[in-house]
């Protein structure tokens, strides 16, 4: 008898994701299609690569920037909209009242963007990492800031997906 493979659990069992802290989140587009943006080289080596958002990418950008208006205890620390995924650093500071979790924020973001785009555009689930300390935060910050340059280094691999 053929058994379906056991799906890996998405969340850590000992974390409620409502705990105060910073969360590094990665959300991919459905089938990893490059629908959010285009990355282009900088004019010179002293500048970072540029990101040109698509119409869907603009919806993502507006929705990310609107998170703090919907969740008073959540702030977006940093983010980048890549061609087929987004990275977010979000800070959650629950202090009584409605307890917001990282999965709640991600689910809301995905629903709002899909509704505005008129189609389901996201891969199921998302990657998360609980930021442990200031050094870990710096690593994730640098990863977000450097991701467009890394994309250009691997652009042949990604352009085959378009």
Image (cartoon, helix red, strand yellow):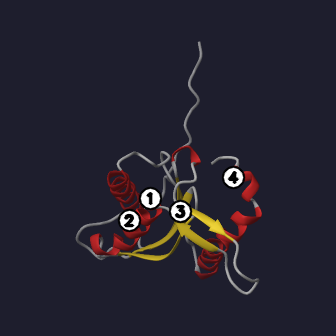
Q: Residue at x 59, y 29 (%)?
A: 5
Residue sticking out furthest to the bottom: 46
Q: Residues within 10 Å of mark 4 (few under 14, many from 20)?
A: few
Task: Give the quadrant of the N terminus.
Answer: top right
Residue 22 in view of the camera: no
Q: Which residue is mark 4?
A: 159
Whether residues under marks 3 and 1 lie with C-beta atoms below 8 angstroms apart, the answer is no
Question: On the rendered structure, is 133 left or right of 15?
Answer: right
Give the mark, 2 or 4, whose residue is nearer the N terminus: 2
Q: Which residue is mark 3?
A: 86
- Mark 3 residue element: strand
Give the mark, 3 or 4, whose residue is nearer the N terminus: 3
Q: CA distance from mark 4 to mark 1?
A: 18 Å
Residue sticking out furthest to the left: 97
Q: Position of residue 52 (x, y in %)?
A: 55, 69
Q: Position of residue 137 (x, y in %)?
A: 59, 77
Q: Residue at x 32, y 52 (%)?
A: 115
Disc marking residue 18: 2
Q: Position of residue 53 (x, y in %)?
A: 51, 66
Question: On the rendered structure, is 145 left or right of 130?
Answer: right
Q: Position of residue 12 (x, y in %)?
A: 51, 54
Q: Which residue is mark 1?
A: 56
Q: CA distance from mark 3 to mark 1?
A: 12 Å
Q: Nearer the viewer, residue 34 or 132?
A: 34
Q: CA distance from mark 1 to mark 2?
A: 29 Å
Question: On the rendered structure, is 82 left or right of 61?
Answer: right
Which label sits in the foreground, 2 or 3? 3
């Amino acid at each position: 008898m053929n058994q379906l493979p056991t799906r890996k659990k998405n969340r850590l069992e000992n974390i409620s994701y409502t705990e105060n802290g910073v969360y590094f989140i990665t959300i991919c587009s459905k089938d990893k299609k490059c629908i959010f943006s285009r990355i282009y080289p900088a004019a010179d080596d002293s500048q970072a690569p540029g990101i040109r958002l698509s119409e869907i990418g603009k919806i993502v950008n507006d929705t990310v920037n609107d998170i703090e208006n919907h969740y008073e205890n959540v702030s977006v620390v940093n983010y980048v909209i890549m061609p087929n995924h987004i990275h977010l650093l979000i800070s959650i500071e629950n202090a009584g009242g409605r307890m917001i979790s990282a999965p709640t924020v991600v689910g809301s973001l995905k629903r709002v963007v899909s509704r505005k785009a008129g189609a389901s555009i996201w891969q199921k689930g998302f990657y998360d990492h609980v930021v442990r300390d200031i050094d870990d935060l710096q690593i994730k910050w640098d990863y977000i800031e450097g991701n467009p340059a890394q994309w250009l280094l691997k652009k042949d691999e990604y352009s085959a997906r378009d």
